[in-house]
Amino acid sequence: MTFAMFRVMALELWRDRGALVMTFLLPPLVFLIFSAVFSGATGEDIKLKLAVADVARTVDSRRLLAAVVADPDLRADAVASGEEVRRLVRAGRADAGLIIRADPGLETRPVLIVADPSRAVAAPLTMARVQQAMGRAMPDVLAARTLAETAPTFGGLTPRQQAVAGQTMDALAKAPPGGEPTTGLFAREDISGARKGGGAIAYYAGAVTILFALFSAMHGALSLIDERRSGVADRILAGAAGMGPVINGKFLFLLGQSLLQATAIFAAAQIIYQVPVLAHLPLWLVTTLLVSACAAGLAMAIVTFCKTRDQAQMLSTFVILILAAVGGSMVPRFLMPPWLQTLGWGTPHAWAIEAYQAILWRDGGIGSVYMAWIVLGGVGAAGLVLAHLAARRIR
């Protein structure tokens, strides 16, 4: 009897080729994608996007600017002013900013790091990367700073020691790139209006909202499979209206369910962490409606194209996990390799998270979220249309 049951289940899996493929081919694919996502977040492979401005305009500040922009471990763009650096960091278009405000060879703390507290590791990682770039391209400047900082401890340098030090600096300036970083270079400034932890809370409130909206929508949409198996769909199809009202009704229910779920999440964020949801209620409500519609439409489309519950459960789990990983619900996207950050814009998660952060963290208006609204609404509408088209095949 035991062997017979084993044989029945094995034959059932073998005959369901869709479930067979998703059982044995999708897990290795998920592993490869997750390994790419999480291996890029270890620190060594992170390539931060920086906005850099040289307002000192000295010989050494120009050398530093050139070294940072050319560094292969960074994605740095030179901009015209310190205010432009702050604007780009505030808008989320740069992970951190770098303002070279004094001569790096002479002044105390000549480099100002402009940081977004919602990207907590970006500032210290920027400091480390810039120090490494200086160590490779400007060893003479680093040696001069170290000498200037340590000489008073030993009572100053004699004329002969100063001459030897000058010769050493000249030799280092002409030496091939290399060397180790030093300290005492940086000051830090958080973007205006930033409150520690607030940006991260807004980020993960959005990340959790889209993640659970999809989980709940997928689970609710599975009832379509059950209705096919039980014969309910056949009785519905016998009527004049067909499956259209069923699809629309389920879509509206899933949309409402996701909206209530998001309300609970952001109510907790408002009450416990003072995330300013009520202060941005109209924009938040539109964003949440579109996030909910996106999740409902995507879930309906996936389930209606599956023939069995096993296929639908496996495929929906796969889709949710991959979209969550690549879209930033599990790891902040700025910690991912650049190619994965670009790929993330193909997921609703990235757009939803960006929209919530733009509204609740950066105090953005419609101009900062309209593209996210178009993408989320478009995915939801396309999913609903595909669900209607797939439902017609049941006939």
Image: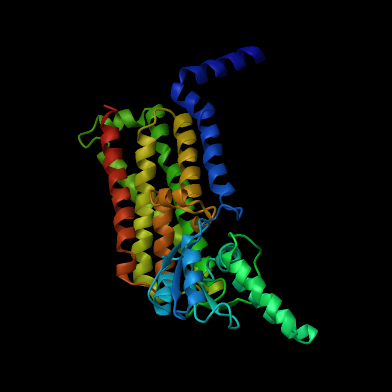
Q: Position of residue 304 (x, y in %)?
A: 35, 35
Residue 78 quadrant: bottom left
How many numbered badges does the structure rendering display?
A: 0
- Quadrant of the rendering where the C terminus is positioned: top left
Quarter of the figure with the N terminus = top right
**In terms of depth relative to the viewer, which is nearer, 37 or 164?**
164
Question: Would you say residue 1 is visible in this rendering?
Answer: no
- Residue 317 in the image: x percent, y percent? 49, 39
Decide which of 240, 381 is in the foreground and name it.
381
Which residue reaches farthest right? 154
Is residue 237 found left or right of 260 in the rendered image?
left
Indicate whether 1 appears above or below 21: above
Q: Is residue 216 above or below residue 361?
A: above
Say if residue 78 shows up in the picture: yes
**Image coords of residue 387 (percent x, y):** 30, 39
> Looking at this view, is 256 or 91 the one in front?
91
Q: Residue 160 is drawn in which quadrant?
A: bottom right
Name the residue: 45% across, 41% down. 319
Residue 87 in the image: x percent, y percent?
Answer: 40, 74
